[in-house]
Image: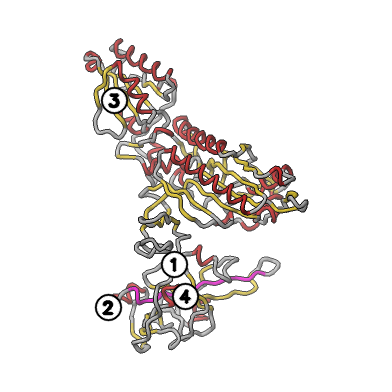
Amino acid sequence: MKATQFLISTLKEAPADAEVVSHQLMTRAGMVKKLGAGIYTYMPMGLRVINKVAAIVREEMNRAGAIELTMPVIQPAELWQETRRFETMGPELLRIRDRHERDFVVQPTSEEVVTDIARQEFKSYKQLPRNLYQIQTKFRDERRPRFGLMRGREFIMKDAYSFDRDPASAQISYQAMAQAYRAAFDRFGLRYRAVAADSGAIGGDLSEEFQVIAATGEDAIIYCPTSDYAANIEKAEALAPKGPRPAPSKPLTKTPTPGKSTCADVAALLNVPLQTTVKSLVLATDELNDKGEVAKSQVWLLLLRGDHDMNEVKVGKLPGFEQGFRFATEAEIVSHFGCKPGYLGPLNLKLPVHVVADREVAVLADWICGANEVDFHLTGVNWGRDLPEPELVADIRNVLEGDPSPDGQGVLAIERGIEIGHIFYLGTKYSKAMNATFLGENGKPQFFEMGCYGIGITRLPAAAIEQNHDAKGIIWPDAIAPFTVVICPINPDRSPEVKAAADKLYAELLAAGADVILDDRGERPGAMFADWELIGVPHRVTIGDRTLKEGKVEYQHRRDAEAAPLAVGEVAAFVLGKLKR
């Protein structure tokens, strides 16, 4: 490719709404253009990156035995109604109607459609296992699209779906996909971790996320530096403290805490460790009638140590919370506790509530909590003596750095990551909902055991930039760079020798299969170098009249501080050698 035949549209400044580095640099490098909130045009430079990502994913999926197809972006609601996701998925699912007032959805994922294909095509256990995948446009109506391609509404995703005869076979398919993902992500040249994860709205049991390590990552990755344990913050278990609960040593005392409504403020006032305080979180669950109206509500009190934060995913899996929960209204709080938020606790309640204690709180002695009276807290609170044991003790908090690792092999550390892939073992969640069966060896109908496997094709380049950039711009790994090599001739219009040398090197690299671009625009050296440093092409060869007279050109990797001289006759072999590493 020659630059004059391509579209290079770099900008000196990023748009004001570009909050993260990847959004800023992709816009400035002319890779994307915003069309609407969370909706982007992939410009030629960015599309080359996306196509390279997709090609690597496609190769590894094919190598793993998956079969490619393409499912419609617009899907009839009837299939989604079979699984009830049409009603339950929430506003992220974009629902539309055609001219005949028939309901459709703009697909965010395709479990329903692919399950419908399986129940039509796979009639016997002899046709299994099967894995169908697509690389297709998706749409999720995010409440707050931001961060460019990191959290857009329209995006490209690779989604695959495996169909097996039994759980043991499904586990084999799952592990085959896990290996294929590692092979693909290794080829991208990115630092990543595979972490145990929660399945979220898609559902399922066994689940792993693939996270690109980046300081700007949205997700907290929990891992043990001395073992293989890794999980995301929603999944990471906080172990129960070892040893029995200490015996009470302090009397229950109502203590004035004027104007101190947070655990941190109370601990500072009383000059005690924050770990001795207990925070009260009041939640509510609703029972709905046949019309979808709230028929009855139940109030819950969750108790966590003052230095801990509630993990909503863990709470959502507690008995009684399966249908969802919300934070209680102030009216509900006042009616049950007789006090406004800020001074709440489990003693002296006006109406009964269900009490859930975190594992750490369950073994505390002489702890501090709200007195259910403004400007007062209770000190010296003890289970059994001052209040009944909690109805339920559970892990309901986020882990902290330094907590014991669940595998017993050390302590936990935390780093930030960006999710680029997710694999799920679904079991029969969708096949049962859609009555998708095949004839087993016994001649009887059986439900498919399914798995689901996604990679964010357009999210991955943004994640790569968050991990690989500097003050000048992007630094692409070779495998997904828009061009791998750029040739920069200095003033070729004034020097026939420079132009001839540039054309010759370009032809040699092109013939050898290198993904090379020749910058024949005639730009000033400073502007030309700034463009390619911003775009992030990893290998640059500069050809100038002065060095050419000495029989040399200059080579510089995007990460190198300075260029290195090379003999003209050696440069092509040298660059090709770099590309093979």
Q: Nearer the viewer, residue 95 or 540?
A: 540
Query: Is 443 one of the magenta-colored residues?
Result: no
Q: Find residue 303 and report its horizontal and vertical position in percent.
A: 45, 75
Q: Amino acid at mark 1?
A: Arg
The stretch drawn in magenta includes residue 285:
yes
Ranked by sequence position, the earlier of labels 2 and 4 is 2
Q: Position of residue 172 (x, y in %)?
A: 58, 48
Q: Circle 1 sits on which residue?
A: 397
Q: Determine which residue is flagged by label 4.
A: 357
The residue most toward the top is 496
Question: Dot 2 lies on which element?
Answer: loop
The disc labelled 4 sits on which kind of residue?
Ala
Q: Where are the magenta residues, as a range?
A: 274-288
Q: Residues within 10 Å of mark 4 (few under 14, many from 20)?
A: many
Which badge, 3 or 2, is on the more N-terminal residue? 2
Residue on which disc 2 sits:
271
Where's the N terminus, which quadrant? top left
Closer to the camera: disc 3 or disc 2?
Answer: 3
Secondary structure beneath dot 3 equals strand
Residue 267 shows in the view: yes
Q: CA distance from mark 2 to mark 4?
A: 24 Å
Q: Which residue is mark 3?
A: 555
Asked if marks 2 and 4 touch (Cβ < 8 Å), the reply is: no
- The disc, 3 or 4, on the residue closer to the chain's N-terminal end is 4
Amino acid found under the numbered disc labelled 3: Tyr
